[in-house]
Amino acid sequence: MENTFDIHNSEIFDSPLSSCPLCSSLHINKLYIITSYSPSFKVDQCSDCNFIFMNPRFNEKTICNMYSNDYYSGAAEYSYYDERKAEKFSNYVWDSRLRALRKYVKSGNFLDIGCAFGGLLKRASKYFTPYGVDLSEYSGKHAKELFGDNIHIGSLNSHPFDYDFFSVVTMIELIEHVADPVSLIKESYKLLKENGLLLLQTANMNAMQAKLLKDKYAMYMPGHLSYFTTRNLTDLLRQAGFRKIKVYYPVEFGLLPKLLKSRYRFKSAFDYIRWLRISYYHCISKIRFGNFAATSSMVVYAFK
């Protein structure tokens, strides 16, 4: 497929944005053209809040088409993995994540935004009443078979849930897929009960990892519309009303669950060499001071 970038192609792109979708500043500048995918796309950066965003963005039809069965089977250029095939190993991470968040919230209604096939919800259902939102008909249908009407297939904009209903809302590597993160965070705040917990995982684009790799950084991919720093993400959460924010580098649980999860790709004993790379990344992720971080991994807890 020819790799081209044409902002006037209305079949693929929306109209370009003239202001920052996070802080509304008019001071936005071209950052990179990402040529690793076809078609290529452009990302801009706000000079006031440092928010990075795809501009122009793929239109709604293009985005919806991305999350077909090809996305989960690896048949598409932009793809993910089918978590059902790795569920045994993913459980190590999901269980560790639940142990960490249950230090703050023990039970209640649990909403996973971007729930995919419902793997995290299955583990959470031991303690919480599970609910989910997912844009994909393909993965959402499977989650709906598990949890019925507690699963909403579509965006959060059209959800059927009551406000002040959830004790926990999770967004695991989800917010970067959203065109309007301000509305997403405001809506999540409304959905949470008093003292409820919002858990976010995304990349910190102010980290050395992202800065060194520049346009070659793996986070720059077609489904990612929004790219945060620790500062502008926490500012967004505070503006929405969250009273307490806690940031973890790289994640809120330890190294062992990540090592155990990685085994789902192993074919032979030699694959355990990968544990050296995973361990090294986890350890250097602890190097941080002020606004500096060595790697881009971060998890944010925000309390209503």
Image (cartoon, rainbow, N blue to C red):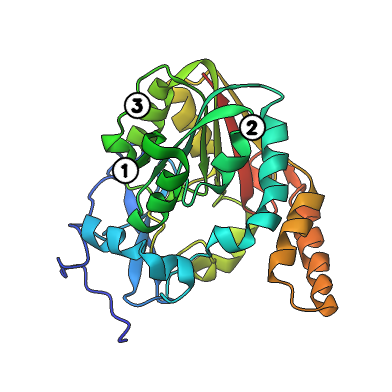
State yes or no: discs 3 and 2 in contact (Cβ < 8 Å). Answer: no
Q: Which mark is residue 161?
A: 3
Q: Residue sitting at 38 percent across and 51 percent down?
A: 141
Q: CA distance from mark 3 to mark 2?
A: 21 Å
Q: CA distance from mark 1 to mark 2?
A: 26 Å
Q: Amino acid at mark 2?
A: Lys
Regarding mark 1 in the picture, which secondary structure is present there?
loop
Asked if residue 182 is positioned above or below residue 202 in the image, the reply reads above
243 and 201: which is toward the camera: 201
Q: Residue sitting at 66 percent across and 53 percent down?
A: 90
Q: Residue furthest top?
A: 194
Among numbered discs 3 and 2, the one appearing first in the sequence: 2
Q: CA distance from mark 3 to mark 1?
A: 12 Å
Residue 201: quarter of image: top right
Q: Amino acid at mark 1?
A: Ser
x and y, in percent, of residue 39 in the image: 31, 75
